[in-house]
Amino acid sequence: MGVVWVVFMAFPITSALDADVSDSTRGLAVGLLLAYAAVYIAGYIWMIRSDDWGRAARRGITAIVVMVALMIAAALLIGPGALGAGSFLISLAMFCGEARTAVIFSTGILIAEYSALAIVLSAMPDGFGEYGVLFMPPAIVYVSVGVVRLIIAAQERHDTIERQMALVAERERVARDVHDVLGHSLTVVTVKAELAERLIDIDPARAKAEIAEIRSLARESLAEVRATVAGLRVARLGDELDAARTALAGAGIAAELPTDPSVVDPRHRIVVAWVLREAITNVVRHSRAESCVVTLSHDGIVVTDDGIGVSPGEAERGFRGLRERVSTAGGSFDVGTADPGTRLEARW
């Protein structure tokens, strides 16, 4: 973008070629102006390769200082025509730092350039008539590059917001998945530990078997948590049906569970598996139910129990993560008190 403005070097170079000076002076002035253009192009490339606006600003200011010195030297040789190169200072300044700082810096350079032109031209008999055109390029560059700079700043803000939203979504996913994984696993471990404690004196062999299952569950839970944090955890409906059967049996709750998970639409099976896991965890942990029925269909799942039911507040708070998961997948989620017990439903 910035290299486009090299076209504005035509006027100061033409002024140098037409200046009423010796050939050596003319050649030196042209050389200074070409060096000015080279520093501008090099400075622009140097800036856009910077990895942050702070470094770009330092590089840009360095280039601007060198360019000002070259322009003043050329102006001393050929007159105010060399000041027509001042537009390039504005172009570089627009990328010296964050957008607000860069615009302020560019505005300062524009004012300084106009002031210098006004002072120089007012001291000449027909300065404004002969060189008044020099006021146009700085304004054109200031507006054009300024608009581009503001567009870039807006895009950067948009990208930053998107990254922040993605980070928040990832944190919520990890929190939700860890809650669902550990909530279910620890509930089953607790139930089996209580059962093993009761059996340890009356049936040591069965108590030993329950303790072995607790150890296995703990290892599986650790692997699931690691997979969840890594973003690799996928709930499988068939596995969750087996886990639900084990958990309900361990809690002494009569279970009526389907055996064929394939009835559920393949697009929704993973989310239905999460719903089943969380629903069974709630039944085992809170419901005080004697029986639980799970019904699967092509477009969803229904879980009912004959326990103590849930209040509207508990339904809202206790299933917030699950509600978000179903909603994100394009489904509807409802949980409330049945007669008796609790009824939980997810549909697509």
Image (cartoon, helix red, strand yellow):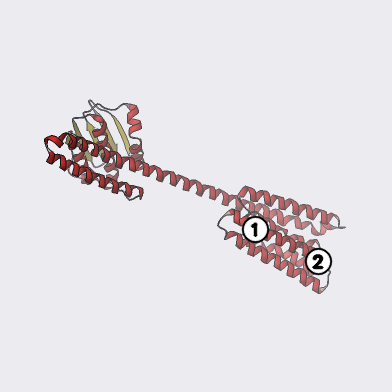
Q: In which quadrant is the C terminus drawn?
A: top left
Rendering quarter of residue 27: bottom right
Q: Position of residue 302 (x, y in %)?
A: 24, 36
Evaluate whether residue 330 shows in this view: no
Is tag 1's residue or tag 2's residue first in the polypeptide sequence? Answer: 1
Report the number of discs: 2
Secondary structure found at label 1: helix
Q: Residue furthest bottom?
A: 23
Say which of 195 and 106 sits in front.
195
Dot 2: few (<14), some (14–19), or many (≥20) neighbours within 10 Å? many
Q: Position of residue 105 (x, y in %)?
A: 68, 51
Q: Position of residue 201 (x, y in %)?
A: 13, 35
Rendered image: mark on residue 77: 2
Q: Is residue 252 left or right of residue 274?
A: left
Three-letter residue code for mark 1: Gly
Q: Where is 278 relative to 120, above or below?
A: above
Q: Position of residue 176 (x, y in %)?
A: 35, 41
Three-letter residue code for mark 2: Leu
Q: Residue furthest right?
A: 125
From the viewer's perspective, is the residue at label 1 or at label 2 nearer?
A: 1
Q: Are marks 1 and 2 in contact (CB under 8 Å)?
A: no
Q: Is residue 132 left or right of residue 315?
A: right
Evaluate whether residue 291 shows in this view: yes
Say which of 7 and 118 sits in front.
118
> At 67% from the left edge and 59% from the top edge, which residue is drawn?
62
Q: Which residue is mark 1?
A: 60
Spatial CA distance of label 1 from label 2 is 26 Å
Say which of 243 and 104 sits in front.
243
Q: In which quadrant is the N terminus drawn?
A: bottom right
Rendered image: mark on residue 313: none
Say which of 149 and 192 sits in front.
192
